[in-house]
Amino acid sequence: MKATLIVIILFSDLLVSNLRAGSYSEALTYLKTRQLDKALAAIDASIQSSESAAAYELKGRILHAMGRTEAAMDSFEYVTRLEPRRGSVHFYKGEVFFKAKRWSEAFHTYRHALEIEPERKDSILKMIYCLVIMENYPIAHQWLTTLDPTNDLKPDYYFARAAMAYATENPEEYVSVLRQARTIYSTQVFNRYEPDLLRVVQLIKNQRQESESLPATSGS
């Protein structure tokens, strides 16, 4: 009788664990395919069975993708209370600031993520994006030198260099660097990185147009 009860308890625990893992996996898949309502429902189901930092982090990413910025930040802040040294959640907090055009806050949040997880080179790329938008080119160039152009898995170096080239008005280098990236990396990888770069390019264009539209000031 006692042995049977132990087996039932172990089976129940295993079933709950599998359901939790399944809900988390489903939520991640739905997020990647932009089925955001289904993603949120799946991650909520996962959280009901276990309030893990990973689950709340994923919930924050889903809410951010849905445009629910405050709720996303609440979820990320909860993760930092559960696991203060979880570098990925600071990166995703940086993403919220980046989308909101809060460049200085985004930069420092990405940098904090990098301090916790030095292998996160995507943090450096986003830091460089923030710096070029803020027109801090010397510091951006310093960070560019820390990226590895021989990394054949992630094109952070090439996209950072392209952003620098465009920001410093070197269109030939911009085109050349992106052409190199297209030949080195798969279309899937390139397309995953391109939207953020294009957003940075558009922001720089807007800044230039605003600057050009300002009336010229004459000396006294």
Image: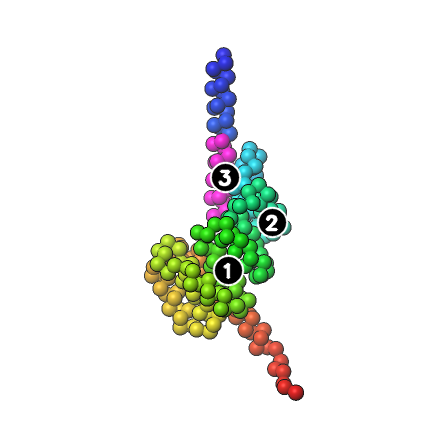
Magenta stretch, residue numbers: 17-32
- The alpha-carbon separation of the residues under discs 3 and 2 comes to 19 Å
In the drawing, what numbered circle is on residue 2? none
Residue beneath label 2, please? Answer: 73
In the drawing, what numbered circle is on residue 24? 3
Residue beneath label 1, please? Answer: 127
Q: Residue at x 47, y 50 (%)?
A: 117
Q: Amino acid at mark 3?
A: Tyr
Left or right, residue 22 beside residue 82? left
Q: Residue furthest left?
A: 183
- The alpha-carbon separation of the residues under discs 1 and 3 comes to 29 Å
First-in-chain label (1 vs 3)? 3
Q: Residues within 10 Å of mark 3 (few under 14, many from 20)?
A: many
In the image, residue 155 lies at what x, y percent?
40, 58
Q: Residue at x 51, y 22 (%)?
A: 9
Q: Residues within 10 Å of mark 2 (few under 14, many from 20)?
A: many
Q: Main SS of the magenta segment?
A: helix
In the image, residue 89 lies at what x, y percent?
53, 48
Number of labels in the image equals 3
Instruction: Identify the element where label 3 is drawn.
Output: helix
